[in-house]
Image: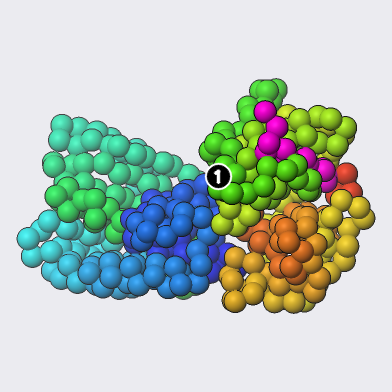
Amino acid sequence: MGAEDFASIQQDLIWTGDLNSLPSGEMGKRSYEAIRAFQKRIKAKETGIFTPPQRITLAQHAAKFTARYGFETITERGITLGYPAKLTTVRTDGKNGPHFATPKNDVTLDILAIPADKENFEALFTRLKTERPGRKVTYSLLRPDFLVVAGTNDGKSFYLRFVKTDADSRGFALGWDPALSPGFDRVAIAMASSMKLADGDQPAHVPPAAKPAEPPAPPAEPPKPVGPPIPLPPGASTAAKVGIGVVVSANGDILTYAGLVAGCETVTLQGGATAKVVGGDFGNDIALVRASPAPGLAALAWRQPALTEGEAVSLLTGAAPTPTTVTALTGSHDDSRRVSLASGAPGALIDKDGALAGLAAANGEPTALKGLFVTAFLRAAGVTPPERGGDPTKATASLTCSPGKP
């Protein structure tokens, strides 16, 4: 799944009310939790990863809201954005742009272009974030190329977003009766995510900021765990299990399989060191253990781009990497969480640069959980990638789990 496809999922999650941030095309903690929230609402297993049928269900739910508000695209004052056309049917035109409203005036929208020679970008931000009797600002953000201000004004909620060009500040001011919340709140986020400069227009030139001197780094805090250790399924064997894990952070976080570490609070690494089982997900057979740090082991870098069909990759099985190839961008039964491989073996999937690109199936089937979902699981657990990836041949660890051990 590419960034564009995942951004589409994020956009739909905004419409279902599960995500309150702009689409980035990357899986992070907010997106992971939003997916789980939607899965919980439709009474599906909360894996944080959509199956193809669940993706269809998400799109159907999102479509109900876009239809309810009549969300359409409009270009005015040098910007293109979506807006609730079905509601805001009353239009009047002003000096700086059009004003839209509902017949009851419980929703208002102004699309504006404010010339820089009349009010520069920073002055606009200062004015918009100023509080006065009846006006309260609950959120404000200024960046070199855009600003956001939100709050309440005379009993009405508002959300303002402007982008900076060399000639002017362009954006919108949306206001609504709080009685329409929380359902209407998603419209503001959807509008913000849809807004862009009209074709041919360019944002203001923003010179790169000087990099400040970096203070000494504080001691790294251990990542927060995802949850309790993974319980052993009823009736499962309590015999000792030995398998593989791969180091994914400088703090000693080790990626492995849920089935391997189920039933254990700690596992033993080669050499006798122990690692704590943090948590995992049986649905995707993925787990996290922590060695704090892993002795004598290097951490893999995390790959960002999605894998491509035909790409040469390797299976990190504990010895030398075993070359293989991505043969399809879905797994068996058209599983969009996985890629298909020319060959399989338990271990991490790495690309030609030695970066983590997925987690191969524990049973040796020629499939692997995509890196997008692996890194989403890690980020949701508070794990951060290493600043620099280490030698892949020094990144694997042998893990022993003894569920029957007191």
Looking at the image, the residue that sits furthest to the left is 104
Which residue appears at 18% of the width and 42% of the height? 153
| Residue 224 visible in image | yes
Looking at the rendering, the stretch of residues picked out in magenta corresponds to: 395-406
Identify which residue is drawn at 63% across, 40% down.
Answer: 263
In the image, what residue type sits under mark 1?
A: Ala
Q: Nearer the viewer, residue 106 or 336?
A: 336
Give the left or right position of residue 305, taking residue 323 as reference.
left
* Residue 403 inside the magenta-drawn segment: yes
- The local crowd at label 1, few if under 14, some if 14 to 19, many if 20 or more residues have their Cα within 10 Å, is many
> Is residue 361 left or right of 396 when viewed as pictured?
left
Q: Where residue 280 appears, x then y in whole percent? A: 59, 46
Q: Quadrant of residue 405?
A: top right
x 53%, y 38%: residue: 227
Q: How many marks?
A: 1
Left or right for 233, reference 365 = left
Q: Nearer the viewer, residue 58 or 232?
A: 232
**Image height of 68 relative to 20, above or below:** below
| The N terminus: image quadrant | bottom right
Question: Image quadrant for the C terminus?
Answer: top right
The stretch drawn in magenta includes residue 377: no
Which residue bears the numbered disc 1? 380
Q: Secondary structure at mark 1?
A: helix
